[in-house]
Image (cartoon, rainbow, N blue to C red):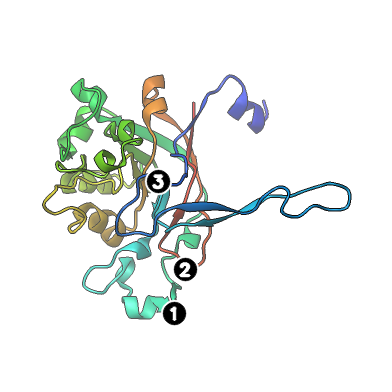
Amino acid sequence: MSLLDALTDGHRIADLSQPLENGMPSSPTHPPFRFALAQRHGDVVREDGLTGSHELITMGGHVGTHMDAVSHVAADGVLHGGVPVAQALERGRYRVGGIEAVPPILCRGVLFDIPRLRAVPRLGPGEAVTAEDLAATGLEVRAGDVALVRTGWAQLWDRPADYLGGEGGVPGLDASGARWLAERGVRAVGGDTIALEQTSPEAGLGRLPVHRILLQENGINIIEVMNLEELSAAGPAEFLFVCAPLPVVGATGAPVRPLAVW
């Protein structure tokens, strides 16, 4: 059997990304997504009647389903690997730790479906996903895997204020869960919320220990704003995971369209 046959014959594919459109939820600390037609059909008509249309898109690198590069966070002025920010930054972009340095990912993925574990539709605002939760799923995690953490928060995608936390915060991975995954050597961690980690209405995005543990201390990329609902409904706990960020040179993050195949 050919590799193509092995990947396509009788298998299912789940798109794990959220659609990009005006008005979608985005972090208030990042430039939002904006789409507008720059040329419409009929604005320019060629002699043979053919017309073309195209658009202008603006957005931050951490808007929509995206991957964080290790240059996204620093601690005490130092990036992952002990590189001082002052040495990594050159001409307005990062020459060390940029998103273009992340190779395409084709590996085993595992889904930590925490609402399924707790027998609820989705986690409540501000709830933590702990190391104990991850261990309780019974999933084997291997070095080089990508770990996806479902909270069910994607169900609120069409309610931006609620998706961003409203008055109660957002559920997500806590420091113990991040360390548990890092100790097992995962290559990336993804989630279905705006910041992957648990946030409270008091701290908001002002304190991000999971980002520090994964990105700055361990060099583990983060994938945020995923849609894990179809994958959860289908039921596979492990699958082939496919993902590649746009190679924006020197950027701290970029859009991705991750896929699960099983």
| Among the two numbered marks 1 and 2 on one chain, the one whose residue lies closer to the N terminus | 1
Q: Which residue is mark 1?
A: 90
Q: Residue at x 33, y 34 (%)?
A: 154
Q: Quadrant of residue 233?
A: top left
Q: On the rendered structure, is 197 left or right of 226? A: left
| Among the two numbered marks 3 and 1 on one chain, the one whose residue lies closer to the N terminus | 3
Q: How many marks?
A: 3
- Secondary element at image label 1: strand
The Cα–Cα distance between marks 3 and 1, rounded to whole angstroms, is 33 Å
- Secondary element at image label 2: loop
Label 1 Cα neighbours within 10 Å, binned few <14 / some 14-19 / many ≥20: few
Q: Quadrant of residue 118?
A: top left
| Among the two numbered marks 3 and 2 on one chain, the one whose residue lies closer to the N terminus | 3
Type of amino acid at the residue the image marks with label 3: Gly
> As drawn, which residue projects farthest toward the left?
202
Q: Which residue is mark 3?
A: 23
Above or below for 172 versus 35: above
Q: Residue at x 28, y 67 (%)?
A: 74
Q: Residue at x 14, y 47 (%)?
A: 200
Q: Which mark is residue 250?
A: 2
Q: On the rendered structure, is 19 left or right of 200? A: right
The Cα–Cα distance between marks 3 and 2, rounded to whole angstroms, is 27 Å
